Image (spheres, rainbow, N blue to C red):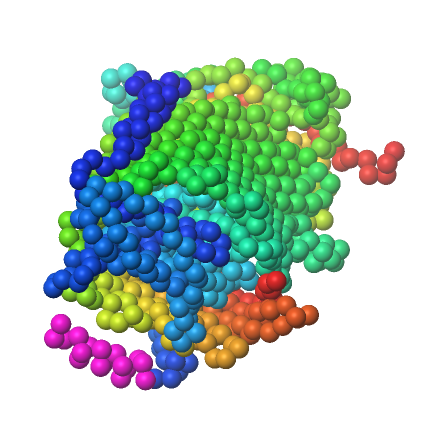
Amino acid sequence: MNIPGFHRPALMAGLLALAGVLALPPVGRAAVLSGRITESKSGAPVTSARVTITSLPLSDPPLVRGAYSDTGGVYTILKLPAGRWACAWQAFGYDTFRDTLSWGVGDTLVRDVSLGARPFKMNEVTVRADPYARDRAVQPGFVQLGVKELQKAPGAVEQDVIRSLQLLPGVSAASDFSSGLYVRGGGPDQTLVLLDDTPVYNPTHAFGFFSTFNSDAVRDVTLYKSAYPAQYGGRLGSVLDVNNREGDRQKLKGTGGASIIAARLTLERPIDDGSVIFSARRTYLDPILSALRKGGNEIPSFYFYDFNARVNRALGARDNLVISAYHGRDDLNLDLDTGSFVNLNWGNTTVTGSLNHVFSPTLLGRLVAYGSDYSSDTKVSFFDTPATFTNAIRDIGLKSSLEWTGVARHRLEFGISGNRYRFGLSQEFNQTDSPDLRERPNGGAAWLQDEWTPNERTTIRGGLRGNVFGQGGRFSLEPRLSASRALGDHWRIKGGAGSYSQYLQLVSTEGFSGTDFWVPTDRTIAPGRSYQVTTGVEWEPARRWQLSAETYYTKLKGLVQLDDRRSGDAEGTTSQDIFRAGGTGYATGLELFAQKRTGALTGWVGYTLGYSRRTFAEVNGGKSFPPKYDRRHDLKLVADLKRGKWTYGAALLYATGQAYTPAGARYVIRDPATGTPGSSDLLLPAPRNSGRLLPFFRLDLSATKKGHIFGLPVDWVLQVFNATNRQNEWFIQYNTENPDTKPEITHQLPILPTFGVNFAF
Amino acid sequence: MRSEPIFRAALSRLILRTAPGLQFLLLALTLGLFGCGVRDDRNVYKPTDVGVLVVDGILRVNQPYPSIYLRQTLAPDATYDAAAAAVHNATITVTPLDAQGEALATMHYRESRDNDGRYVPFQLDPGSAGGPAPRNRIDAQQRYRLSVLDAAGARTVTAETTTPAQFRVTQSVLLDEATLEVTRTLRSFAELGQDAYTAPENRIVYQQGLLEARFTLNGAPAYQIGLSSLDVGSPRVIQADFLSEEDYAKLTRENSSPALEAPRGYVRLPWFAIFFAGRYRVTVHAIDRNWYDFIRSVPQLNGGFGFGGNAGDNFERPLFHITGGIGLFGSACSDSVGFYIEAPDTTGN
């Protein structure tokens, strides 16, 4: 669909013209020092390295200037007086490089530096360069975890990226079975999930038990819990940005592992001016399930697999090309009897190509082309009565951005993006098909952001994002703001706010993600909007400790809820037909976080006090109610203790019980179609979600021992999920056929000891 | 800051100098002890709506005025007791209304002797107060009002329904499952009366073909199918390894479909709705808005509960369209077809 006023070629031309203007060398008589900082071993850019230059001879006070390198390793220091300068390039985890340079009036000096890796060890804990220092400094609600941190926490059978994030304050799970992200009182559909800049529409395997992210392939994970910056958009709540890692640029390396259900293998090697990495993972439950089936049980066959690949290659001195891809599928088959079966197949495929270009020392460009495809295909037959349900979403897009540091104390970023969706939804029951939903809307966005550092202690990041969406001819303008100020050497205060919109809606069942599907909202209903404010204070009394407190408030409107009272053969496919629309709500809370980062014992304690409410005219008599994932109290403790070859891990979670709707009365009405007494009583619900399941408590433990097999270093891992075997409640089933029977309470996972081995070569 | 050393010293004493393993164990035990609540089954109920009047009455076009049940809700954790639920000595009337909402006549009801909350229509003596009695037949496209006043005169319930237009199943056919071509046209009650059940065209082998009932849409918001196995004691035809004897014991001879909008003027009968051999009567109901809204908002009547049990996300207050109480006061115009299900030949012949 064409959107008035939105012409991608024109915007691209404009962007290139702007790049040309911005790429001009700085004008004036002052000198400029710039260059690129790379890692000597791998050639990878070093982000957030600090460059400090001191005028010689030393004066009192000394004249000192400095800058940080950006994500491409590029740094620039402007407006330098002529003279001799002592220069130092330094970054955590690298040897500091020093040199003395001289320049004259108006000179432009380019000095590229390679830093040797020098793991900075402090009581066995390796401190690496922090490529997210800027975001960490200015963004409230910002969390960034490297792969080491992700692998520390005890997992549920397999290490999992999203399950590790669920151990942070403000992030929760629907259940033990869920790897969905419920961030600061929002649902999983309100979090934008990106893998190497590409949206992933159903980031789960095994009905949500595992995420799609293979932790062996992941470099780091960034979570913006709220008030996320202008380069992101399209979701009401938060952003999860997952980056796969680059392959080794020096030699062939391999890592892998096996657990009781799956095996993983990652291979990486250098190529000309770059590297390549390939990861694969597959479950091998099939033989076990097959054996159980032969015992006469109705056990399905099930497996999932996924692949990740990434190629990095430098194209000359100014360009770096990255191509990455992901493909994963889940498959479940259950043959019940002749004419009765269940077959589910679903999965994601993503492909991303990105090109980073250095126009000049002060101007960087980035172009990303991506494609993301999610499809789900369900075929069911009971007694020769077939039913099929298929859905797919394809998102193909192009993003381009520029980062300009030509003005001292400012970092200006500008970007545009355009994409085309293809939605498909079809269903058929008993050879009667319902009308298909086939939509191909266009989307687009342009954003501008300036990070201003008026002084050493203050950073202000302001942005504006404009979104267009073809379906319904939607347009939204979204201001974003975050700011931080250091108070002394140990304290920092932060604040952030923003406006957000969402044009896609996820239709899902909580706790079961195999048949999730996305549909665009059309002109029949208003899209979702949110307004967020967050504030925080951090205290870092010493390097080993960090404590923080954050508050958040999100106001929501234009929320939708699937209308499950709709007739199964209804033909309407507009948003108004599918959803109950016009919902409002809010989420607010306080997060406390204390982290011990170094020493034999590391870990954190996080606590969240949260309130979340939703209001729909057609639900609960129009009165507000808590969503199921509303948690008043949520406490998490994660600890990691090293003792020689052993590492012990523990994660403890305590939370207010999930909200549910209790039965308020019992009554009987005859079946109107037959005129006979119904086969069971009916229950009248009490106010929606006015009951609470028992508090959730879980303790997970792990022990890892370093050893060798055939000369290869290995980690033996023993994990105990739910070590206290606490019977956490999942949901309640009232028995209406036999009222003498007690309510049936379905519990979450019991104690689950597992073991595995990880290796590297 | 001045307070910093004090705070850090406190941290050191409380946390840093305790053995790391012990710190964690203590916290885990503390939270575990406080976190482990004990489930009392009564706690999962919340008796917010006990004692609410429940109306149960369906007006069927071309049929006499029906019985109407008046009961009340019981505690959610109570075993349902029909006698305890029955509401006695209430005053119930059903009144056909004209276009302006004025009463055309009034049908009065009195409690039956069953003592189960059933009220039956009766004609007042000529000349008594209460207005003229209507013809004892429900008309199509007619608005009716229900009024209920309990014995104490404290609680009133009112509701209205507008009956659907006349409705008729025009054709019943058996389709080829692969091609969807008509392989046979079934005989109707209009043609053969009760002999339709045993007419050769109406004898269908279980799971062979696809049964389709065709009709002309009459403007009703939805349709519902009622399915009755008439030969009590006839053998079971449904058979599957994954069904247990307990499952088989729950199979009933009276079943109904979810609400269907049937936008193309036909409904197809799923084979998983047929459990027994013998005579079957399929009734297609063109239903009014009250009936439609009620069954589509009660998960048990509309295809079962979704994920999360019946306390899950779709456990919502049904759409009753009743003032002062809950229940269903609806109407329908219905037509039926009959056929005979034969068990498949399992000998391979």
Q: Is residue A711 left or right of residue A102?
A: right
Q: Is residue A8 left or right of residue A439?
A: left
Name the magenta segment's main secondary structure. helix
In the current view of this chain or complex, which residue is farthest to the right? B349
* Residue B224, image x, y percentages: 51, 29
Residue segment shown in magenta: B1-17
* Residue B158, image x, y percentages: 28, 34
* Looking at the image, residue B1 lies above or below residue A132: below
- Identified at 62% across, 37% down, the residue is A379
Using the image as rendered, state which of residue A107 and residue A387 is in the foreground.
A107
Using the image as rendered, state which of residue A11 and residue A62 is in the foreground.
A62
* Residue B315, image x, y percentages: 40, 46
Using the image as rendered, state which of residue A170 and residue A696 is in the foreground.
A170
* Looking at the image, residue B128 lies above or below residue A231: above
Image quadrant containing the N terminus of chain B: bottom left
Residue A481 part of the magenta segment: no
Using the image as rendered, state which of residue A173 and residue A459 is in the foreground.
A459
**In which quadrant of the rendered view does residue A194 lie?**
top left
Q: Is residue A417 left or right of residue A370?
A: left
Residue B3 part of the magenta segment: yes
Image quadrant containing the C terminus of chain B: top right
Q: How many marks?
A: 0
